[in-house]
Image (cartoon, rainbow, N blue to C red):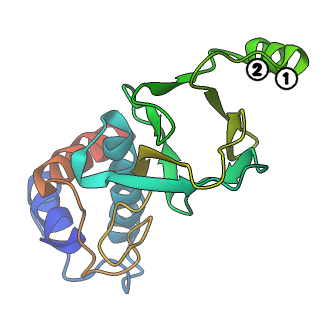
Amino acid sequence: MTVLSACAQAAIVLTGRPPTALFSSSGQFERELQYLANEAARAIAAYADWQALTRLHTIAGDGTTGAFPLPGDYDRFPVAGAVYSTRSTWPLRRVRDLNQWLDFGVTGMTGSPGCWIILGGQMQFRPALASGDSAKFYYISNRIVSGNKTAFTDDGDSFLLPERLLTLALIWRWRSLK
């Protein structure tokens, strides 16, 4: 189903008339639905760790690099997520705050099998991943619309999560706006 069909279903409840187009229309109601559809989609995606938005990322170590860029579509880390390294059967330890990360940097003690933090838009490891080692973790993608997009830009775009959620969110958001 498309964003246009979700908006049309919501519009029947809201005004009794479904729009025939959203993104090519200059009408006030259609423009509101465009905006609200994107806001609702982002809010729905942020609500839970949806499997449809979950991706696996692998980082290859080189023995010296301790910081690696996050994936281009990275939105957030899952609530119960972990980072696993090929150097151990145990997950790497998540650093709880910046003070602990600083302490590990000053003292050089991190414990086994190592630790990680997301800092400055990068996944950082202590100690650095050895050459031949890799780290794997799941993350939630920000690409929530068909065609590998982060927002609706065309009437034919589809939400990667259930359309019913989008339709109900549109109804609620439009009514609360008015």
Residue visible at 37% across and 66% down? 34
Instruction: Say which of 39 and 148 sits in front.
Output: 148
Q: Quadrant of residue 119?
A: top right
Tell me if residue 166 comes above or below residue 31 in the rendering.
above
| Label 1 Cα crowd, 10 Å radius (few <14 / some 14-19 / many 20+) | few
**Alpha carbon distance from label 1 to label 2:** 6 Å
> Which residue is identified by label 2?
101
- Residue 17, how many percent across, how many down? 12, 68
Tell me if residue 106 comes above or below residue 64 in the rendering.
above
Quarter of the image with the N terminus is: bottom left
**Of the residues shown, which amino acid type is indicated by label 2?**
Trp
The residue sitting at the right extreme is: 106
Residue visible at 16% across and 63% down? 6
Point out the frontmost of discs 1 and 2. Answer: 1
Instruction: Say which of 37 and 127 sits in front.
Output: 127
| Residue 178 visible in the snapshot | no
Q: Quadrant of residue 157?
A: bottom left
- Residue 109, how many percent across, how many down? 77, 15
Mark drawn on residue 105:
1
The kind of secondary structure element at disc 1 is: helix
For this view, does 127 lie left or right of residue 1?
right
- Asked if the residues shown at circle 1 and circle 2 are in contact, with their CB atoms under 8 angstroms apart, the answer is yes
Tell me if residue 1 comes above or below residue 170 in the rendering.
below
Instruction: Say which of 54 and 3 sits in front.
Output: 54
Residue visible at 24% across and 82% down? 156
**Of the residues shown, which amino acid type is indicated by label 1?**
Gly
